[in-house]
Image (cartoon, grey):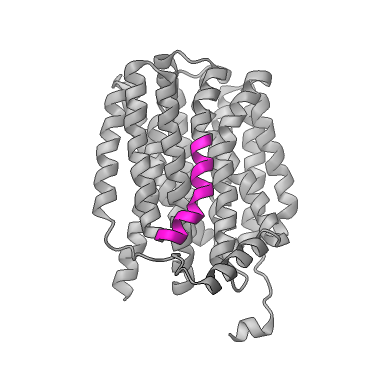
Amino acid sequence: MQTSLHRRKIALFVYFLIPGLALASWVTRTPAIRDAIGASIAQMGMVLTGLSVGSMCGVLLSGYIIKKRGTKFTMLFGLSMVCISLISMAWGVIEGQQPLVGLGLGFFGFGVGTTEIAINMDAAFVEQETGQHVMHTLHGCFSLGTLVGALLGLAANYFDVPVRVHLLGVFVVAVFLLLKFSVPIPGGLGKEDGSAQQTLQLAHAQTSVWRDPRVLMIGFIVFAMALAEGAAYDWLPILLVDEHGFSAALGSMIFVVFAAVMTIGRFAGGVLLKRFGRLVLMRSSIALVVLGVACIALGQSQTLAAWAVVCWGLGAALGFPMALSAAAEGGGQMGERVKAVAIIGYVALLVGPPALGFVGHAFGLRGAMLIVAGLAFAAIFLTSAMRSPRLPLATVAA
């Protein structure tokens, strides 16, 4: 039993790594992709709208797919869409067509929106079964994927590897990992049995969690922190190149630093949580996000911008996973609470950043980043929701 649970955790970690790898692979090539399809900042915002639409569809349909087919099917289906997205984006670059790249981003958003909610739900059940913190390591694997993808993108930029070759290579690796680690994950988790009584109970649970003030407060925190993370993934290389005068290669290198800091922060999450506790760590994380993003938005020095990226990455590292772990606590309806907070987080992570492109067109990318800093600053006043709730005696006894 212990061995199968360990193999299940490893499979979940690998499945969380794949979207990070795919994400960083195209993020580090965004200046080259933009040039290949001849897109302005506003047009890139339109291209990234594909990511928004796909993400919204994936997030909204994820619960339905999980209920009908379970978390394992949802993961495999979503990751297959992520793989298809790489093919579509490579095709769009070959043809120089903005709509094809936008379609690829739509596939990517749909795939990530469905699979990562399923993985987070599965990981929350693993946390409950083992009594161990898993979320920070899970999201650390996503960051590890972004780090590996960013390093590959940096090398591809340095050696002038064509974008199409780069993306097709990542596609092959992603398909291999998808097939290799599918067996250890049990099927049927989260699947509805179809009985009228369970359907009624599930509908009531879904309604009640969205009325829970604690869930909504955690949801706002995760929205702000996930938006900060997503804004870096979508806009940081272009922001560094266009607004701070870095070369494309150096901008990619600094993005590698961001990904590395995120990865280190998440894998160190267990030690930090034991040392400082969730509440102090969340407040510190938010403060670092505000400082880093504000310095990027308002500063003029390249040195300051580079250090601000470090603060941004450290601050964003643990916000999302800590919020999901907090949502899992509180008695019954754990799966519904985690799903609700995850939906909010992935809307922010995947849908929010493309919307910043339209703000950036009107007020500049620096102005758009001030929105990110402002939301993070507001979130710090809601962090009391991160405390573990006091359960009724009957619940504890059960």
Whether 65 is among the magenta residues is: yes
Name the quadrant containing residue 21.
top left
**Residue under the point 61% across and 29% down:** 356
Question: Main SS type for the magenta part?
Answer: helix
Quadrant that contains the C terminus: bottom right
**Residue under the point 26% across and 26% down:** 165
- Residue 312 can be seen, yes or no: no
The relative height of residue 233 versus residue 61 in the rendered view (above or below) is above
| Image position, residue 192 (x, y; %) | 46, 66
Closer-to-camera residue (107/249)? 107
Name the quadrant containing residue 170.
top left
Q: Give, as a single range, the part of the protein colored magenta.
A: 53-69
| Image position, residue 390 (x, y; %) | 69, 74
| Image position, residue 56 (x, y; %) | 54, 41
Closer-to-camera residue (96/226)? 96
| Image position, residue 328 (x, y; %) | 57, 65
Name the quadrant containing residue 332.
bottom right
The relative height of residue 301 versus residue 310 in the rendered view (above or below) is above
Quadrant that contains the N terminus: bottom left
Q: Can you name the residue that lies furthest to the top here?
A: 38
**Residue under the point 36% across and 49% down:** 77
Number of numbered discs overlaid on the protein picture: 0
Whether 111 is among the magenta residues is: no
- Residue 290 can be seen, yes or no: yes
Q: 111 left or right of 185?
A: right
Q: 191 left or right of 168?
A: right
The relative height of residue 3 versus residue 70 in the rendered view (above or below) is below
Closer-to-camera residue (255/217)? 217
The relative height of residue 96 versus residue 381 in the rendered view (above or below) is above
**Residue under the point 53% across and 39% down:** 350
